[in-house]
Image (cartoon, rainbow, N blue to C red):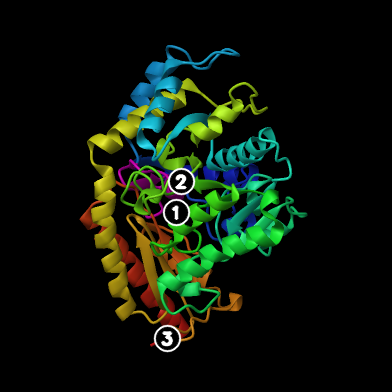
Amino acid sequence: MANTHTDEIRNMALQYQWMHNADWTQMAETGEPLVMVKGEGVRVTDSTGKTWLDVHGGYTCVHLGYGRTEIADVAYDQMSKITYFPQGTTTIPVIELCEKIAELTPGDLSRTFPGSGGSEANETAIKMAKAYHRRRGESGRYKIISRKGSYHGTTGGVMWLGNNATDFSLSDFEPAAPGMIHVPHPNHYRDEYNSKTPSETAIKCAQAIEDAILMHGPKTVAAVIGEPVSQPIGAPVPAPEYWPMVRDICDKYGVLLIIDEVITGFGRTGKMFGIEHFDIHPDIMTMGKGIISSYLPLAATTMSERIAETFGSDNMWHAVTSAGNPVAAAAALKNIEIIENENLVENSKVQGEYLKNGLTELMKKHPIVGDVRGIGLLLGMELVADRESKEKFSKEVNIAGKINKEFKNNGLILQSDGNVITVGPPLCVDQSDCDEIVDGIDASLEVVEQQLGVK
């Protein structure tokens, strides 16, 4: 009966649901999608009763893990009081959440515009940056500098940040938004300058930002945006010179610095915010995912008082239906309380180091692993056809299909694009969970290498 019910539900999904980045024809051929019905900690159970280890933590967003009924309790309690805010009003949980964000964030970040997702938070930040310059009499500043390979969301504007226009998924939406400038990413493993050291990579990539500002004209550039550590390209950690140089360059030319903490925020990197590893303060910071462990939709865009005061008597036209939902705000406050009380930021640091060591050991066994990198529980492994030359596998080899099939065979919810394997489990992960992740990846790589004839 269970399998019959699962088949019915799965067929309904294939007929009616449009899933994230998923081909329903291919899913039908492979017996997908999996239909999850329960979660606890780092594990989820599907409709057939099989339990899986969620190595991604959702979309690197379920920081607390699954099944925290405390979140449900506070959401229910708030829902029984007031579920929304009448026009022109606010609510206590939203006020308290904005105050908490001001307390936690670095520097003088102090005023928050709530939202409902990371893409939306970054769209808000871009609008803020442009409006800020316009209110100061510099309406020509509309260009945004981002780093190649970065990811800042899928909505109409921010999807063009990161220079992913050659990706087939973006070609559907051309032309690109105007004013998008792309510079090299400080990823030493794939350095465009063939630098000898990570520090040299960092310095040259920071200098590329200044070069771009000068080439386009400082009076045309509104902001630089970047993640402290970028997940999509396998979490390369910039050398310590990078972010302080970028901060100084932005200050020199009056360009705002937007730090995207949607993935890295709330403990993912072993500090509350990823940028704290580099001891600089942004002008605008965006947050999502871990702010509420994705128990409900919530995100935030926070700006410094210097930026905020520009809008005090001349507000920016910007409204989002779910911006400031009191139920989500109450849940986020409880989520942050748990992160703090259970020392999950420190656990991210400790377990991240242990997990990274385990993944690094796999390089001794598996020639197709070219690099292991990352910080805290944001880690990446890069796959290569040849470790010496760093040559990537051709699409015809279909590494993604092969490795993802083996992850599934080994009970891991984990997907690779064939170039990198990104590992980002919930922050509540323990040592035995880390061992299971390493063992599952180890077994998966072994089978794929056998299929490829790699010795």
Image-quadrant location for residue 69:
top left
Q: Position of residue 216 (x, y in %)?
A: 70, 58
Of the residues shown, which amino acid type is indicated by label 1? Pro
Please provide percent x and percent y for residue 384. Answer: 47, 78
Mark 1 lies on residue: 228
Q: Are marks 2 and 3 in contact (CB under 8 Å)?
A: no
Looking at numbered disc 2 in the image, what kind of residue is underneath it?
A: Glu
Question: How many neighbours does mark 1 have within 10 angstroms: few (below 14), some (14-19), or many (20 or more)?
Answer: many
SS for tag 2?
loop
Residue 164 visible (yes or no)? no
Q: Is residue 29 left or right of residue 351?
A: right
> Closer to us: mark 2 or mark 3?
2
Q: Looking at the image, is mark 1 or mark 3 earlier in the sequence?
A: 1
Q: Earlier in the sequence, mark 1 or mark 2?
A: 1
Secondary structure of the residue carrying tag 3 is: loop
Do labels 1 and 2 touch, CB within 8 Å?
A: yes
Q: Nearer the viewer, residue 254 or 328?
A: 254
What range of the chain is rendered magenta?
Answer: 40-65
Residue for badge 2? 261
Q: Residue at x 53, y 49 (%)?
A: 251
Residue 454 disc label:
3
Mark 2 Cα shell of 10 Å, populated few (<14), some (14-19), many (≥20): many
Q: CA distance from mark 2 to mark 3?
A: 39 Å
Three-letter amino acid code at disc 3? Val
Q: Residue furthest front?
A: 252
Q: Is residue 21 above or below residue 140?
A: below
How many residues crowd mark 3 within 10 Å: few (<14), some (14–19), many (20+)?
few
